Image (cartoon, rainbow, N blue to C red):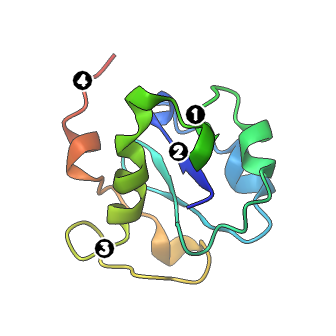
Amino acid sequence: MPFVIASACIDVKDTACLEVCPVDCIYEGGRTLYIHPEECIDCGICETACPVAAIHADDRLPEEERPFLQINAEFFGPAVTGWGSPGGRDARYTTELDHPAVAVWPRG
């Protein structure tokens, strides 16, 4: 997974990254956004567009944010959305669901 959305996006969900992603690999959950690990092309545009510095390259992800590698990937699996590889964000792939770790994240 080249880029990962981490905890700073929870309950913020600024969509600047959605607007600049050339392959529409960023999807909207209930409390945060998620990057699809197989659809991201590692361009980095989303990282520079994020106003809260929530997006990191996987090899520069702060240690305390490492669980978000798995959180982003599992969001698309059968335990959360079951979307698999949707092939690009559109209205059908927006949900109020979140990964269980995000759903119980303390509200700040």
Q: Say above or below: 91 vs 61.
A: below
Badge 1 crowding class, 10 Å Cα cut-off, few under 14, some 14 to 19, many 20 or more, is many
- Tell me which residue sits at (35%, 52%) in the image: 71
| Residue 54, numbered label | 1
Q: Is residue 101 visible?
A: yes
Badge 4 crowding class, 10 Å Cα cut-off, few under 14, some 14 to 19, many 20 or more, is few
Q: CA distance from mark 3 to mark 4?
A: 23 Å
Mark toward the start of the polypeptide (1 vs 4): 1
Residue 93 in percent (x, y) is at 47, 72
Mark toward the start of the polypeptide (3 vs 2): 2
Mark 3 = which residue?
77
Q: Are marks 3 and 2 in contact (CB under 8 Å)?
A: no
Report which quarter residue 72 is drawn in.
bottom left
State the SS at label 1: loop
Mark 4 = which residue?
106
Mark toward the start of the polypeptide (1 vs 3): 1
- Side (left or right) of 60 relative to 28: right
Q: CA distance from mark 1 to mark 2?
A: 6 Å
State the SS at label 2: strand
- Tell me which residue sits at (37%, 70%) in the image: 76
| Residue 5, numbered label | 2
Residue 95 in percent (x, y) is at 38, 62
Of all residues shown, which one is farthest toward the top?
108
Which quarter of the rendering shows the N terminus?
A: bottom right
Q: CA distance from mark 4 to mark 2?
A: 17 Å
